[in-house]
Image (cartoon, rainbow, N blue to C red):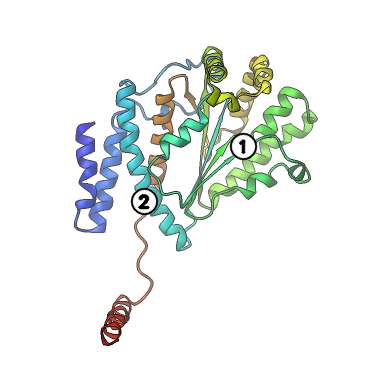
Amino acid sequence: MKQIASHAQAVDSADTITERLARAAKSSDMLSSVWTLPPAQRLRFSANTRLTSINAAATPGFEGGQEDGERFIALSAAEIARYQRLMYANGVRGDHHRLLIVLQGMDASGKGGIVRHVFSQVDPMGIHYHGFGAPTPEERKHDYLWRIRKELPANGWISIFDRSQYEDIVMPHVYGTVPEEVWHERYDEINAFERDLVGDGCAIIKIFLVSSKDAQRKHFLGRLDDPRKYWKFDPSDLDARDRWDDYMVAWQQVFERTSTSYAPWYLVPADKRWYSRIVVSELLRTTMKNFNMTWPPLDVDRDEAIRRLNGDMEEDAKD
């Protein structure tokens, strides 16, 4: 990690933009090299993946401990900030690259903590976070994707969804609130929706945080023991916990029907919060790196702009 940190510090000392970008890419590659197998491969849902068979306390692909993970995320966060600024600058100029991160998981699986840690160093300009709860009366007047479309990232932006369009499959699956033939159609509708987004330059990272019932119980008890966290607890959380097995069945079918080549699902063990955070950080950073962007060129006459600015100085001096 020390070698990676030293290389990262040298990125901005390069003489040219091209060299800085090359050094940044090298720094990102060095971070990726600490994994024995990249999360994009190791944690991607496949036909043989069974949600209930995943060890929520495991740290697949990462041989270090929590201290190593915290060093990793600090270094990765700095690189994420660099690529985010680059993507935003290009978006201002009309480039369509943008990023949607979908965070799903059972209650108390750590979705909020991921947002706070992974995005700790980014510029707030260019980041949009939205949590989806039960549809409001206004939202119920529209198609279920209406409220999703409203929160999609603009060119150059990153949108983070805490829950998403997939709630409109899982909830009726578990509770029967919508006829089965209706929510079944949504698998294909969402696939088509995401295919169109990707085709227009929006990369999609879909994360399911795999937590255990025991870890959830401990987090719930922690909320009930801390007056500062009472606001996080809702009795409906216990109702969902009672239907845990039903949720697992529903999510397994979601992964089987909607993990596609253009928008795959990643199932991330989340009992060790530091591990799930470094996985999301790795997936985010490498996705933006692979956009292979450079800084947009100046679209005005530079010499003329300098002349006018220097002219202003001369006029001020006369005054």
**Image coordinates for residue 84, horizontal then vertical, percent:** 40, 49
Report whether 209 appears left or right of 86.
right
User: Of residues 138 and 165, which is closer to you in this image?
Assistant: 138
Which of the two marks, 1 or 2, is nearer to us in this view?
1
What residue is pinned by disc 1?
164
What residue is pinned by disc 2?
292
Q: Amino acid at mark 2?
A: Asn
The picture quadrant where one finds residue 315 is: bottom left
Q: At 51% across and 32% down in the image, what residue appears?
A: 112
In this rendering, is residue 132 above or below 309?
above
Q: At 59% across and 27% down in the image, what residue appears?
A: 232
State the SS at label 2: loop
**Image coordinates for residue 287, horizontal then vertical, percent:** 42, 42
Q: State how far apart marks 1 and 2 are (Cα).
A: 28 Å
The total of numbered circles placed on residues is: 2
Q: Quadrant of the C terminus?
A: bottom left
Numbered mark located on residue 278 in the image:
none
Q: At 25% across and 52% down in the image, what residue appears?
A: 20
Q: Which of the two labelled residues, at mark 1 and mark 2, occupies the earlier sequence position? A: 1
State the SS at label 1: loop
Q: Amino acid at mark 1?
A: Ser
User: Of residues 239 and 37, which is closer to you in this image?
Assistant: 239
**Image coordinates for residue 305, horizontal then vertical, percent:** 33, 77
Q: At 23% across and 36% down in the image, what residue appears?
A: 4
Report whether 298 appears left or right of 220.
left
In this rendering, is residue 303 above or below 46?
below
How crowded is the residue under tag 2: few (<14 C-alpha within 10 Å), some, or many (20+)? Answer: few
**Looking at the image, which residue sits at the far bottom?**
318
**Looking at the image, which residue sits at the far right?**
179
**Image coordinates for residue 265, horizontal then vertical, percent:** 53, 32
